[in-house]
Image (cartoon, helix red, strand yellow):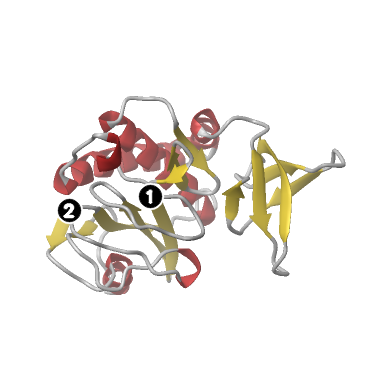
Amino acid sequence: MIRTVAETGSTNADMIALARSGIEEGVWLRAERQLAGRGRHGRSWVSPEGNLYASTIVRLRASDPPAPTLALVAAVSLDECVSAYLRREGLWLKWPNDLLLDGAKLSGILLERADGAVVIGIGVNLADHPDLPERRTTSLAAHGVVVDPADFMETLAETFARWLGRWRGEGLAPVRARWLERAHPPGTALSAAAPDGGSVDGLFDGLDRDGALILRLADGSRRVIHAGDVFLL
């Protein structure tokens, strides 16, 4: 089920409140405009009309794969959805859940815990994209693709439900395989933010069995990255 509102502060904040009030899994909340949208690590998310701003909830079960791997579920679902409207090369996934178009950021995904549930927020630059100093961004409209946010939401809800079902029924393996199939090529130069404020540079060497990023360093060793921002070099 999809609920649509004209304006709100943040669909994730709203969905967290709804999760704690007992809302069932499978509901999506879409806003035509956000006043206080946010991305990872508390960053603001510019939210003009015409783009997608939506959140859903997954109520965790004891038999589910690890909750953080829902980031990969959301990423492959979004990639499949965008691919239905944009049939061209240059669309890549970047760990853990960014979708890039010709190397520019097209979307953002934010996971937040709400007691025994995970709220997943997805923002997609459909009609407009911000000008950010630290990274390149783009939109579908910039590539000649006009998409109605309501139609896009319907497609995304369908693809997410399908991949969530596979994650639950088959485990992480098929999601991981699909993510790797749609990721930037092995050997892509990446920089991962380190907990001490520094960074680790290396070449993309796949994902481990739990979905963590593997970087091949200059000395030939491999570093497993479990959390943090990752940038193309």
Secondary structure under badge 1?
A: strand
Residue with the most extreme right position: 219
- The disc at residue 157 is none
Lower sequence index among marks 2 and 1: 2
> Whole-percent x and y of residue 214?
69, 43
29 or 117: nearer the viewer: 29
Say above or below: 63 vs 44.
Answer: above
Mark 1 residue crowding within 10 angstroms, few (<14) / some (14–19) / many (20+)? many
Residue 233 visible in the displayed image:
yes
- Percent across and percent down for residue 168 are 44, 43
- Amino acid carrying label 2: it is Ile
Q: Is residue 116 visible?
A: no
| Residue denoted by label 1 | 107
Pointer 2: what residue?
2
Q: Residue at x 47, y 47 (%)?
A: 98
- Residue 147: which quarter of the image? top left
Give how far across and how far down residue 209 sits, in percent.
65, 40
Q: Residue at x 60, y 44 (%)?
A: 211
How packed is label 2: few (under 14 Cα within 10 Å), some, or many (20 or more)? some
